[in-house]
Image: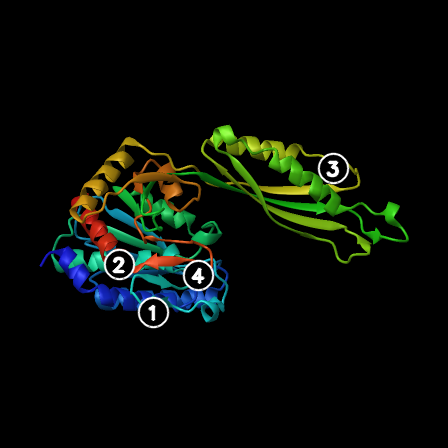
Amino acid sequence: MKPSDYLFDHHKNMIEDLETLVTMETPSGSKILLDRCVKYLEDYFRDNLTCTVNVIDNMNAGNNLLIRFNEESTMKPILILSHYDTVFPEGTLKKIPFSVSEDGEMARGPGIFDMKAGIIQGVWALKALEKHGKMKRPVIFLVTSDEEIGSGSSRELIEGMAKEAEAVLVLEPSLNGNLKTERKGVGEIDITITGKASHAGLDPSKGASAINEAARMIQFLQALNNPDAETTVNVGTIRGGTARNVIPGEAFMQVDFRIVEEDEGRRIMKEARLFRPKDSRVRLEISGGVNRPPMRKTDATGRLFELAKRIGREFGRELRETSAGGGSDGNFCAALGVPVLDGLGAVGDGAHSEQEVLDVNEMPVRAAILERLLEEI
């Protein structure tokens, strides 16, 4: 039996494992729920695979999980990157329970596409690899808890593992089935605007409106978009004020920007700090910067993709490469000069939305492609 036959024969078991993982809600901000999921994954790896499992305690987010395979090999390891946190708040499962369509082709559930199916595919690829004695290099499987909120507490761990790796394979979902050889860099800006509150009817002139200045600053920030450089700037959240009859004394904004060139990140931060309120009584506090550097395609990444492309044809899939506007933990690794192939996870659509869906029939195919990559690199 070939490893791919093993995976297709266990397709039903993959779906059962996926249901278990999806029905464990893991919002990035809930350490209790995250650690509960890590405990399940820890036990699963210990019970089903020959590996060394280490739980990395994390006080600032959920615990991280580091699993090592084939440690006796002296070759450089392959790093598999994944994350188990999702953008969906606790309780979403009641609204969008795990389900598989009547024709058995599509599945739904919070985080199923981004990226719990990727984790399950990775697990089963390693099962197939181990069962058939095809594991040559050491493999490090890293499962982190805070990717969806910037990987602030796991970045050092990710970069440390990447520095010793021959290649990094990222189980983020595919983009319309395509693999990702480039990603934009991601930046974040937090802005606090402090004015002066006053009664809107009795003493309007004594107030200094933080919201008025926020409105001006939004227009200023939008002007920093640069389509020619593929730079995008988005004011994602804004809040402020206390009541309709009060001149608002405070406002807060969260800004996201995406860049292809690192110089653009420096430009945006410099320009944002040049904004001056029209009302001299208003003060600004601006913090942030580039969170994830751009992921550039290198010759080594190109060779990884060509290998994946050849393997995909073995399973009747014509894999294509693409660039993505979203960042991942692969960005950190690429910045270190390590070849990174991203988007090796699920095939589906609707990431981060209530319409998130998974193509169930592609799970064993993607697992088989990953298994062959691990075998051949």
Tell me the crowding category of disc 2: few under 14, some 14 to 19, or many 20 or more residues within 10 angstroms, Cα based.
some
- Is residue 133 positioned above or below 299 on the image? below
Identify the residue at image location x=62%, y=35%: 272
Q: Which residue is mark 2?
A: 361
Q: CA distance from mark 1 to mark 2?
A: 18 Å
Tell which tag, 1 or 4, sits nearer the viewer. 1
Q: Which residue is mark 1?
A: 20
Q: Earlier in the sequence, mark 1 or mark 3?
A: 1
Residue 73 seen anywhere in this rendered image of the structure: yes
Tell me the crowding category of disc 1: few under 14, some 14 to 19, or many 20 or more residues within 10 angstroms, Cα based.
few
Identify the residue at image location x=29%, y=60%: 360
Q: Which residue is mark 3?
A: 277
- Residue type at numbered disc 4: Gly
Q: Which residue is mark 4?
A: 62
7 with respect to 292 (left or right): left
Q: Earlier in the sequence, mark 4 or mark 2?
A: 4
CB contact under 8 Å: marks 1 and 2: no
- Is residue 356 positioned above or below 164 on the image? below
Q: Earlier in the sequence, mark 2 or mark 3?
A: 3
Q: Earlier in the sequence, mark 3 or mark 4?
A: 4
Q: CA distance from mark 4 to mark 2?
A: 31 Å
Q: Earlier in the sequence, mark 1 or mark 2?
A: 1
